[in-house]
Amino acid sequence: MVSMTAVLPLTSSVTETDPSCCPPPAGAALGAEEAKQAALVFKALADPNRVRLLSLVKAGEAGERCVCDLTEPLSLGQPTVSHHLKILVDAGLLHREKRGTWAYYSVVPGALERVAGLVADL
Amino acid sequence: MVSMTAVLPLTSSVTETDPSCCPPPAGAALGAEEAKQAALVFKALADPNRVRLLSLVKAGEAGERCVCDLTEPLSLGQPTVSHHLKILVDAGLLHREKRGTWAYYSVVPGALERVAGLVADL
DNA sequence: CCGCCATATCGACATTCATCAATATGGCGG
DNA sequence: CCGCCATATTGATGAATGTCGATATGGCGG
């Protein structure tokens, strides 16, 4: 139990070991910390079922989807789906909102575009 | 020894189980096969050292880099670096060219942009 | 032709991860 | 207040993965 921190600061928040601060020199190679942060986001996308989850949530009406609608198309157990969703939330890609008994997930606005930018200018 | 196939068709090559062919309906959720292909690429990026490798290669002069110049900045053994490079090549992200005793790696033109697009319109 | 050098492959080991069954939590209807 | 329902958490297990040391491959200089 050390996690529960959302990754994807990518805009601010610079918890580096290196004291020489950070706005990436643009054009230069990534440092170890930046690479680790980036890899954390990619790890969240490195599973077929999580990719499908993101896709399903995004395609859902109003851009959101309840967990109960996600277990069936993936042919996965409910605990497993819950686990994957947590990983996507921790990565800063999904947002969770609990309404009554149900939990609705939606794609964090701009998150995918931000990741796309991350890839494009490695 | 089953691998050695480059991923990232993403443009053509559709080895699906599903017979109803494939240009993604655009707007609909991803199928299982598409998600698997995407996840394969993300898996290649899901390691900090591989992200740094890509970055280092891209930042190298003439956009290429010899293996011997890559082991030191990563503090990794040569076999390990070679292994990571192979994964990036198999994912269709890096290109390998052997000149004499040395192996030069370069980013496949447009590969990163293609992956970025993959992420943006999940 | 022999040995050095850069790179790739192999085998092994420790760690991480995806998945499931079982259980906990917490709201809603009766 | 009791039990059902949707969701989350826990524990366990098998598979995948990152790393290393040792070894194989293959070109180049002497």
Image: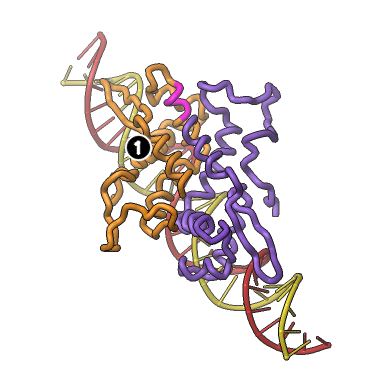
Chain colours: A orange, B purple, C red, D yellow
- Which chain does the residue under circle 1 lie in? A
Number of numbered discs overlaid on the protein picture:
1
On screen, residue B119 versus residue D26, left or right, reads left
Q: Percent x, y for residue A24?
A: 36, 53
Q: Percent x, y for residue B121?
A: 49, 30
B106 inside magenta stretch: no
Instruction: Give the camera-side residue of B109 and A118.
Output: B109
Tell me the amino acid under the disc marked 1. Answer: Val
SS category of the residue bearing label 1: helix
Q: Which residues are magenta?
A: A55-59
Residue at x 39%, y 21% (from the top left corner): A63
Eyeballing the image, is B85 above or below B71? above
Q: Percent x, y for residue B2?
A: 70, 51
Eyeballing the image, is D26 above or below B95? below
A56 inside magenta stretch: yes
Q: Percent x, y for residue A86?
A: 36, 38
Residue at x 70%, y 35% (from the top left corner): B13
Query: Residue tagged by mark 1?
Result: A89
Instruction: Give the camera-side residue of A17 and D1.
Output: A17
Q: Residue A60's quadrant in the figure?
A: top left
On screen, residue A50 versus residue C23, left or right, reads right
Instruction: Give the camera-side residue of B111 and A96.
Output: B111
Residue at x 31%, y 55% (from the top left corner): A22
Q: Residue C22's quadrant in the figure?
A: top left
**What kind of secondary structure does the magenta stretch mostly adopt?**
helix
On screen, residue B91 versus residue A74, left or right, reads right
Q: Residues within 10 Å of mark 1 (few under 14, many from 20)?
A: many
Residue at x 41%, y 17% (from the top left corner): A61
Instruction: Give the camera-side residue of A19 and B64.
Output: B64
